[in-house]
Amino acid sequence: MGDRWQVEVDRGVCIGSGMCVNHAPDAFTLDSARQSHPRTPETDANEPTLTAAEGCPVEAILITLAATGEPVFPPED
């Protein structure tokens, strides 16, 4: 069984660039104010979602392991 991720977007940081939707349209959507939202708060670990988080120009996407809360992205220093 693969990892499950908890995906959150800090809408206080999100600038609405849309990069997340470009990288992972199945994982993210923009609302009418161009703020990003995860389509589902919990998902199977997958490369497009991680790529979207890594490509966010303001690091507004937070990914943690659903079972433990351990950070996936951004990684702990």
Image (tube, rainbow, N blue to C red):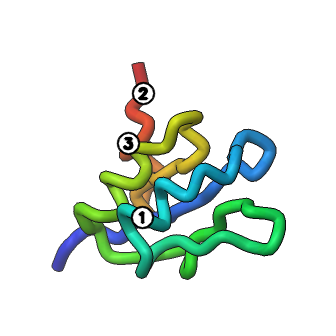
Asked whether the residues under the numbered discs 1 and 2 touch, taking CB atoms below 8 Å apart as contact, a structural biologist would say: no
Q: Secondary structure at mark 2?
A: loop
Q: Disc 3 and disc 2: Cα gap in Å?
A: 14 Å
Residue mark closest to the camera, 3 vs 2: 3
Query: In this image, 9 relative to 1: left or right?
Result: right
Point 74% across, 73% down: residue: 31
Residue labelled with disc 3: 54
Residue mark closest to the camera, 1 vs 2: 1
Tell which residue pokes out farthest to the top in this image.
Answer: 77
Task: Give the percent coordinates (x, y) of residue 35.
Answer: 73, 60
Task: Give the percent coordinates (x, y) of residue 40.
Answer: 55, 80
Point 48% across, 66% down: residue: 21
**Tag 2: amino acid:** Glu
Residue labelled with disc 1: 22
Q: Using the image, determine if residue 58 lies above or below residue 48.
A: above
Query: In this image, 27 relative to 48: left or right?
Result: right
Residue labelled with disc 2: 76
**Tag 1: amino acid:** Asn
How many neighbours does mark 2 have within 10 angstroms: few (below 14), some (14-19), or many (20 or more)? few
